[in-house]
Image (spheres, rainbow, N blue to C red):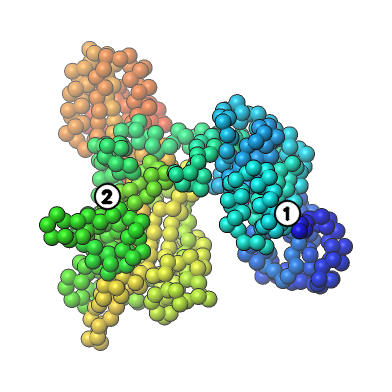
Amino acid sequence: MIISEFRVKKFCNFAALFCENNFDMINITFPDGGVRQFEAGVTPMDIAKSISEGLARNVLSAKVNDKMWDALRPINEDANIQLFTWNDPEGKATVWHSSAHLMAEAIEQLYKGVKFGIGPAIESGFYYDIDTGDMTLTEEDLVKIEKKMLELAKEKQAFERVDVCKADALKYFTEKGDEYKVELINELEDGTITYYKSGTFTDLCRGPHIPDTSCIKAVKLTSIAGAYWRGDENRKQLTRIYGITFPKQKELEEYLVLLEEAKKRDHRKLGRELELFMFTDMVGKGLPMWLPRGTALRNRLQEYLTKIQKHYGYEQVITPHIGNKNLYVTSGHWDHYGKDSFQPITTPEEGEVYLLKPMNCPHHCMIYKWQPRSYKDLPLRLAEFGTVYRYEQSGELHGLTRVRSFTQDDAHIFCRPDQVKDEFLRVMNIIEIIFKALKFENFEAQISLRDPNNTTKYVGTDENWERAEQAIKEACAEKGLPAREETGEAAFYGPKLDFMVKDALGRRWQLGTIQVDYNLPERFDLTYIGKDNEKHRPVMIHRAPFGSMERFVAVLLEHCAGDFPLWLAPDQAIILPISEKYQEYAEKVYETLKNSEVRVLLDDRSEKIGRKIRDAELKKIPYMLIVGEKEEGEGLVSVRKRGTGDLGSMPVAEFAKMVENQVADEQKVEY
Ligand SMILES: [Zn+2]
Ligand SMILES: [Zn+2]
């Protein structure tokens, strides 16, 4: 049996005649809390029209009682509603997922006999996994498909939602010969299956979709890749086509410029060019190796954070890279992650079992436990640049952002419940100082709270939860930090605060995090003696302002495109003699600067000066020091500042002082 909801979509009142709840009125609640009555069967589009024609023109999809919903799908019960346009991520996702259908339709028309896997929207655009049989699609095919998509989009094809019973769905796709859809349908429950039909294409899909294809005005298919069916390397490899669409050609053009810029800033490319880090399968997948220049850069970041943390009362500790299995059984990590982690290491003689450490917290708990603690000792703040190891599937690995070994700028604060807010404020100060020093001017936060309707799944007392959640909210308000509250997003062991930065290209990255934990103090039976001479449970706070050194350096590289602030730059200056005649003087300058605080290079190749300047620019070195006859005669260097230009000539000592001052200025911290 097939029932189309849309056949009657244009005639809402008429449609209501056929509904059970004939002419029933329903309450529609808007995000601002306002409630209005509509006839049952009303669509989000009708509701948009009742607000304004402009909104109706732009509405793409909706959320109805927390479910994504087509703009043209009738609503038959009281509902909370949210309408989405292109300006909302949900609206974009609806356009992009609909574009995946459009692409599939174009491909089906162009190439007979292709079969389809899945075609979701992604963060930017969409993809579809396709079995092309013996045929291999090329870049030229992509151009053909793009053209076809635009042609079909112009037809203003409507997306029609159709309920279908399992038997009919299986019959349809079996006859079509699409075993992928058949496999998917077999896993669905009868009564929950829907098709979406647009033009000549019918897809198994739960939606939602845009009303029709007319809003798709610009198309770019960005790449082709291989992808195993359902991500399983034992199954067939399909062809994955990525694409993106826009309602305006101009938006596509802007996107392509951004994409080009992002490619230039790819941290994997910059890391290679600037000689910061490397990977090799001989060492292992996802195991980064920091080269000397990258190590020096990372050490500078660590020293900077260490200095700030010292001011805030942190104490450094060092713990081993492995830990006895019992440690992780006690912490609960073994039960939770044991199977999905690197597998245990056993000793050859005693049969002891060890694990590569997936986190530093259990070790730090044992340091806390090492001696009795009194309320006067708290907060105890233990910090460690601790390297941890986590198994990630090889397909998930990506440069420095998804790795199997990484170093957290970790710390654990053990405090009394009444100290949580103050500790949050202090950590937020540290994060703010760091983001500012690295020119992340645009950041926001997310507070993850527990679900108040389902409190049983959380550990810790209600009183402590309420207190901690309140403390986090108050701390954000006091700092004037814009923070989004997400109910139900907290971990089972405590609420948390995450920091998101926007980089120079407007991309959002999650970096620092502060997390309250009521679980580990319980599991490790951590206590302190209170004023009342009784034993109490401390609160534990995990925090990492950078997140991890690897991820942070990756984000920083992409943010500044390799143009680090002077205090971090691997090389701060390069000496460029105009010709070999001035080699000796150049070496003298080099020696002088080497003995100062300046990180300096000497380009003593017998290349033309123009070439040397170009190469130094590629290396993004902040200062070029050009030396020739005049400079040698007067004991000077001619200074060119990257991004600024000629600063004139000056004595070597003056240049060194200038660099020193600039570095001090950039690193200055106002507590
Ligand atoms: Zn769909
Ligand atoms: Zn931790």
Q: Position of residue 362 (x, y in %)?
A: 26, 65
Q: Amino acid at mark 2?
A: Gln
In this view, 259 is above or below 461 = above
Mark 2: secondary structure: helix
Residue 559 in view of the camera: yes
Q: Amino acid at mark 1?
A: Arg
Label 2 vs label 1, nearer the camera: 1
In this view, 589 is above or below 541 = above
Q: Position of residue 225 (x, y in %)?
A: 51, 36
Q: In whole angstroms, how far apart are the C-alphas of marks 2 and 1?
A: 55 Å
Q: Position of residue 587 (x, y in %)?
A: 19, 22
Image quadrant in which you'd find residue 161: bottom right
The residue lying furthest to the left in this view is 349
Mark 1: secondary structure: strand
Question: Mark 2 packing: few (<14 Cα in 10 Å), some, or many (20+)?
Answer: some
Q: Quadrant of the C terminus?
A: bottom left
Q: Quadrant of the N terminus?
A: bottom right
Report the residue marked by disc 1: 161
**Looking at the image, which residue is at 58% across and 39% down?**
130
Q: Is mark 2 within 8 Å of ligand 2?
A: no
Q: Is residue 600 left or right of residue 96?
A: left
In this view, 451 is above or below 166 = below
The circle on residue 302 is 2
The circle on residue 462 is none
What is the tally of numbered marks visible in this picture? 2
Q: Position of residue 594 (x, y in %)?
A: 19, 32
In this rendered view, identify the residue nearer to me: 509 or 631: 509
Residue 35 in view of the camera: no
Q: Is mark 1 within 8 Å of ligand 1?
A: no
